[in-house]
Image (cartoon, grey):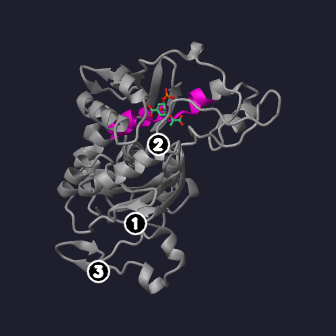
Amino acid sequence: MRYFSAGETHGKGILALLDGFPAGLVVDCAAIDAELKRRQGGYGRGGRQKIESDRVEFLTGLWKGQTTGAPLSLWVGNKDHKIDEMPEIDAPRPGHADLSGSLKYEQPIRPILERASARETAARVAAGALCRQLLEIFGVIIIGFVRSIGKCEWIPDSNLSLEEMVSLRNRSVVFSFCPERDEEAKRLIDQTREQGDTLGGLIEVHAYGVPVGLGSHAQWDRKLDARLAQAVMSVQAIKAVEFGAGFECAVQPGSRIHDPIFHSEEKGFYRTQNEAGGIEGGISNGEPITLRAAMKPIPTLRKPLASVDLRTRTPLDAAFERSDTCAVPAASVVLENAVALEIADAFLLRYGSDSLQQIRRNFENDTRR
Ligand code: EPS
C-alpha cells in the first residue's frame, strides 16, 4: 500500500491518497469523522479548530460504499480557505520549517509554512482511521494516549483493560488515562498560554492483537520497528521515538531487558514481560506493540524568540500567527492513526492485499498466529 498526502493549511483542503488498499471493505465514514473530530480536540488547541469541522469525503475508490481496490482519495476541506490573502512572514520561527524550507526551495516563508503546518495531519488521520476498520476485522486494536505534558506526567496503570483505557482516555480533556488530574494539566496549559509560551509532551501508542510475523528481519526497510519509527517521526513536531523499554535498554543488563519465552497448550508462546515492545528482529512477536514518542512544543510563540529578517538579514523577532499552546492530545490521535496505517500495510504484505476475502482466507489458514 502506498500513502501520500497533498494540501495546504489555508488552501482548499487536505487530500490523502491510498493506493493498494484491498477491495471489499464497507467503509464507515462516521468512524473516520469521529477520529477527525478527536484530532481537532484536546485542551490547549488554538482558534483554527473553532472554524473547522473536519469531515472526510471520498473522491475516488468507492462503489456503493465499498472499497474496490482502486486508489482511494480522501478529502478533508478547509473552511478557512484564504491562502492567497495570507500575509507574508519576514522572520522565520525557530523550530518551524520556515528557514530551512525557504532556503531550500528559494521561496518566501508563506508557501513553506502552508504545507509544513500540522493541519496536514488530518490526511494521516483520515487514511489511518480507514486502515483501522480493516485491522479491527482481524482483532487488531490500536490506542494512543498522552503520557505527559511539560512536567505533568501520568504513569498509566498497567492493569487497565482495553475498555477501561478507552473510557478513561475519552473522559480526559488531554487524552491521558487520568481524567481526575485534568485540572492540573489545564492549569499548566493556561499558565503557559498566559506566558506566551507552548508545551510538548510524551505520547504512547499500543497495538493489541497484532499477529506474529509482520515485518521482516531480512531487509532494513521491511523491519516493522523501522517502518513504524518513520511513520511516527514524520508527524510534525515529533523529535524522538522508542519501542518497549526504549532508551532504558542502554541502562539495564540483558537479563532484565530481554523477555523470557514460555509455551503452553492454551496460550502458545507467551511472555511475562514486554520490554521489546512486541517487536524482535524487526518482526512482530505476538505481544502488544508499544511505542512512545516525544513531541516538541509548537514553535509559534506569542513571546517570540530571536530571529532574522529574511530580506535584510538584520535581527527581527520571530513571526507570530494564530497557533496552539499545546497540541500533544491532538498528536496522540495522529500517532494512533499513523501507526494503524503502517501496521495495516505490514498486515497486507503478509496476508494479501487484493480483496478482503483473500485476506480472510490467508489469515484463517495462518496457524502461527
Ligand atoms: C492545525 C491548523 C493550523 C494550526 C496548527 C495545526 O491552523 P492555523 O495556522 O490556521 O491556525 O493551528 O498548525 C501548527 C501548529 C503549525 O505549527 O503549523 C490543525 O488543523 O491541526
For residue 165, which quarter of the picture? bottom left
Residue stretch in magenta? 113-131
Three-letter amino acid code at the position of disc 1: Gly
**Disc 3 target residue:** 262
Q: Quadrant of the C terminus?
A: bottom left
> Which of the pair 128/196 is nearer the observer?
196
Disc 2 secondary structure class: helix
Residue 70 at least partly seen: yes
**Viewer-nearest of labels 3 and 2?**
2
**Disc 2 target residue:** 193
- x and y, in percent, of residue 194 in the image: 47, 42
- x and y, in percent, of residue 56 in the image: 34, 25
Residue 210 at least partly seen: no
Figure check: 137 above or below 106: below
On the rendered structure, is 67 left or right of 108? Answer: left
Q: Which residue shows up at 46% across the image and 54% down it?
A: 201
